Amino acid sequence: MTRLNWTTSLKLPGCALVPYRASHVATYHKWMQSPALRAATASEPLTLEEEVANQRSWRDDEHKLTFLIQVSGELVGDVNLFLNDAEDLTRGEVEVMVAVESARRKGIAAQAVAALMLYAARHLKVTTFVAKIAKDNAASLALFVDKLKFAKQSFSEAFNEHTLESTAETLPACRAVLQLSADDFVVESKSVDPQLEALRESGNKAFACKDFTRACEIYDELVELDGRDATARSNRSVSRLKLGEYFGAYTDAYLARHFDPHFSKAPYRMAHALAFMGRVDEALALFDKGAAEFPEQAKAYKETKAQVEAGRGNVPALSPPLVAAVKVSDESAKWDVEIESSPNSRGLRFAAMSYIWDQLSGKERHAVFEEFSRAGFQDSAYIPAPEALDDAKAPVIPGMADVNELSKEFRESVKALVKAYGPMARVAGLSLVFESAARRDRAVAAEVLIGMARTLA
């Protein structure tokens, strides 16, 4: 829901609100070195690496809406909305920080808060806004009470702060601050991240030159920077199809659909991957469903469906491991949704692999090792780091999450698959999770897993 602002900027009379990008982290980190700002925002000091992780977490959190404030091209602060009550998403808490001294006392904070509230009221249907202001913060109290017409609701002696709440006059006051009439809206524009767009262009060039391996590597970088980028996942999906990585192609298309339900190419890519996996009937049904859901793409869906029907017999031979993998591919995609939605997606992915690996017998582990080798890793010299082999059942690698971070539902889904489909499903499931990972992640994971296989031989 709050991902609406990820590609949106708001133009205001004296400033602009822009999405919080990875390229902004260094500036934000510099601001937060100030003890005064940390005290004012009740923030703990973070390392730059922690700030990077924090930016990704805020970007992906469905209950936080964040804009940075920009004046004449310079970042000067941020404004946030927190939907803290999952049972009532019509109620949000607002906060604002003007970090740059020269931008204070110029009405910038008032414009930023007013624009955020009007945006949230329009797009997120938020009807009640709350602000918590320290008793001695006269400037913020004046902003919310005098300018934006909030009312004092309560006072906390423990935190020495007022809780303010919007009134019937608040949104009209927001319009007045921004010089908008009752029928006007804040000017919204498309916000492009130059870093992402440069990578996207490079990936598209590699794809056009039929260098699908390089295209995948570039799309890997895009996905690592923004795992919710449906276009990047769709592009990586078709690149993986060209490379014969059908499960990875399906997972990417599945996630593109998950992160953007209106992405018209996602069902098309999913159907393609299903056809290559030998699931032709499901592919044909999905082509029909996609054509009905996206009439503007109906011709492409129907034409490709006809091609799949004509070439129905030309599907890969299904080996026993592949048959088991086909059965669990949908579940694997759901796992990846959970993994990619986590602030620590890279670490959680490794933990997931380790958790499944731990369920395998020695014979099954060698089968997985053979699957990795068959996929092309036999040509690469992966030499595991010594610390990765300290505990063969729980390898220690940088960024790895503790297995306990996996949700109960995730653990139970793995157990259910093993019970339903037998030991081969564990091998196939691990292969699927592994193939769904970015190439750079696969390299590290393969290094650990192959080292484990050698240790246990």
Image (tube, grey):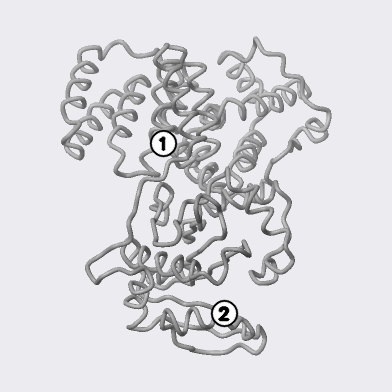
In percent of the image, x 39 and y 76: which residue is there?
Answer: 128
Q: Which residue is mark 1?
A: 330
Q: Nearer the viewer, mark 2 or mark 1?
A: 2
Q: Give me the disc on residue 268.
A: none
Query: The C terminus is located in which quarter?
Result: top right
Query: Dot 2 lies on which element?
Result: helix
Which residue type carries mark 2? Answer: Ala
* Mark 1: secondary structure: helix
The numbered mark, 2 or 1, whose residue comes first in the sequence reads: 2
The image shows residue 418, relative to residue 455, as above or below, that is below
Q: Are marks 2 and 1 in contact (CB under 8 Å)?
A: no
With respect to residue 277, does 67 lie above or below? below
Quarter of the figure that contains the N terminus: bottom left
Total label count? 2
Residue type indicated by callout 1: Asp
Instruction: Answer few, some or many: residues within 10 Å of disc 1's Cα (few below 14, many 20 plus, some between 14 and 19).
Output: some
Depth check, front residue: 134 or 249: 134
Q: Position of residue 181 (x, y in %)?
A: 25, 70
Q: Which residue is mark 2?
A: 139
